[in-house]
Image: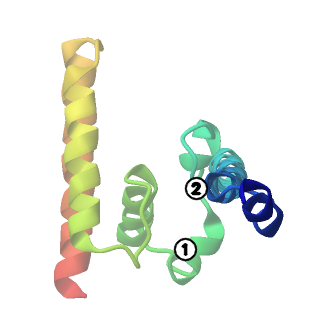
Amino acid sequence: MDYEFYFAFPMPPISILFIILRIFAIFVTIYTLFILVRFLTSPESGTDVGRRNEFDRKRYKNLRSLRTEADERLLKAFKVFNATPNDSYSDISVRYYYLRRMLSLSPLPLEVKEAKLKEIDELFEVITDYYTKK
């Protein structure tokens, strides 16, 4: 009788479960490798430090035509905070506080720190005025 049962079911049920688990593990491995490759090759990845801080002029089309000193100051403010006019005010304020914190913790001389913090404060005021008028 055991021979007939084995003939009807040539593969024990536990083996089917392990085959399904192996197929699932192969798909998970392939998906993990795909995500890892996407992370390492994307322009926003943490490994691409130079590209992250690069100023992209295509994102600032509506600011290019501005030529007055105040508008140049606004453009400089957006460059310093690595933002665009499409970003929200809260995003820029988070970048402002983060930049301010990094400067205050830096090992620069006190005079240099104060000068840079003053400049950052002035640029943040320019952006604040831009968003209040907007």
Q: Dots 2 and 1: beta carbons under 8 Å?
A: yes
Q: Residues within 10 Å of mark 1 (few under 14, many from 20)?
A: some
Residue at x 25% of width, y 88% of height: 134
Q: Dot 2 corresponds to which residue? A: 55
Q: Which mark is residue 123?
A: none
Q: Dot 1 corresponds to which residue? A: 60
Residue at x 19% of width, y 69% of height: 128
Q: Please, what secondary structure does the residue beneath circle 2 have?
A: loop
> What x and y, as percent, mark residue 99?
28, 40
Position of 85 with respect to 14 (left or right) is left
> What x and y, as percent, mark residue 2?
72, 55
Amino acid type assigned to the residue bearing label 1 in the image: Tyr
- Quadrant of residue 109 within the rendered picture: top left
The quadrant of the image that shows the N terminus is: bottom right
Q: Please, what secondary structure does the residue beneath circle 1 have?
A: helix
Tell me which label, 2 or 1, sits earlier in the chain: 2
Q: Foreground: 88 or 55?
A: 88
Residue at x 56% of width, y 48% of height: 52
